[in-house]
Image: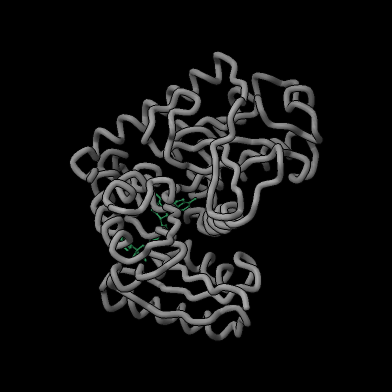
Amino acid sequence: MTKPVTVAITGAAGQICYSLLFRLASGETFGDRPVHLRLLDLPIAAVQQACEGVAMELRDCGYATLASVTVHSDPFEAFDGINWALLVGAKPRGAGMLRKDLILENGPIFTAQGQAIARGAADVRVLVVGNPCNTNALIAASNCTGVPNERFTAMTRLDQNRAVAQLAMKAGVPNADVTGVTIWGNHSATQYPDFENARIGGKPVTEVITDLDWLQNAFISTVQQRGKAIIDARGKSSAASAANAAIDHVKSFEAATAPGQWFSAAVVSDGSYGVPAGLICSFPVSSDGKGGFSIVQGLEMSDWAKAKLAATVAELQEEREVVGHLLG
Ligand code: NDP
């Protein structure tokens, strides 16, 4: 009998979850394991009612793998005994809102959720999607007594997927030919998408795409600004591709990473690559498929790349200072 998996998802009435929940339930993410879904959102009648509607649709899919779906407004109840917490819910950044203000608005949500996860779950892994996700993960981890910080991760997989697609399009190859792309640092406009260690068809990217100016400028800024470009084009945020990346993130941590490969995720720094220990920073990560992971060591960086990494790490340090009063 396969072991069931219990997953709590916050922001369950929101846009990302409307694309995410069905793929958690369907067997795509957890194979044939029975899935218990806990949908958590704000204790507001209309929001809870919207969650009930999503729960009805999930049941109506008739998935063989969906063991139960319940709706919650109390995080202590929703996080009790879970295996995964996907923290999607957060206030989106309003027009003209400074990043610092967003951090201060959303920080307290993650203080409370960290405390609830500590009380409720002994064997849990956490993915933070709600922005600013690196710093929100730091807040949740530091308020979650008894759960190792290594269990808290934040999502940079959408940035990785965007970078892969840009490189594949430029080279005129399928996405599957692009490997070894790393997103370093913060999930923000300072992130550094690393092409120096990536490969196309097994060759260094710079041998296939010889336009270094494009790689160092247009490629990086396209990936950094992609969220805004999608809002400009669509009039709404990139919810479906964010949900897709969240699924990729969970699957990558659940499976053993193939030798010599890695994926991008923001995890707690152990000092690797000179990133101050304790920051939640995006690195190249390899999973052992048994709940453990490691930061992949030994990737070479030019001085230019090291400066990019330093800039995004400096932003993470500034964010940590802004939320210093929320860190447990
Ligand atoms: P979405 O579901 O579209 O987005 C949720 C969060 O994900 C936002 O913080 C958003 O940040 C972030 N995000 C990360 N990557 C992406 C991406 N690529 N594209 C879009 N968003 C991304 O927001 P909705 O407004 O539709 O829904 C939010 C839900 O959260 C609501 O149901 C609300 O009630 C709930 N909520 C729950 C809280 C709680 O549980 N305590 C607190 C606050 C809200 P950004 O927009 O900055 O990119």
**Depth check: 218 or 133 in front?**
133
Quadrant (top left/top right/bottom left/bottom right) for the N terminus? bottom right
Q: Tell me: 9 left or right of 303.
A: left
Q: Tell me which residue sits at (48%, 82%) in the image.
A: 68
Direction left: furthest residue: 325
Q: Where is residue 24 in the image (x, y as percent from the top left)?
A: 55, 68
Ligand 1 placement by image quarter = bottom left
Which corner quadrant of the image does residue 138 belong to? top left
Q: Where is residue 64 in the image (x, y as percent from the top left)?
A: 63, 82
Direction top: furthest residue: 303
Up the image or down, 180 lies above or below 51; here it is above
Q: Where is residue 286 in the image (x, y as percent from the top left)?
A: 60, 43
Up the image or down, 174 lies above or below 296; here it is below
Q: Tell me which residue sits at (33%, 48%) in the image.
A: 141
Q: Tell me which residue sits at (60%, 67%) in the image.
A: 30
Which corner quadrant of the image does residue 101 belong to? top left
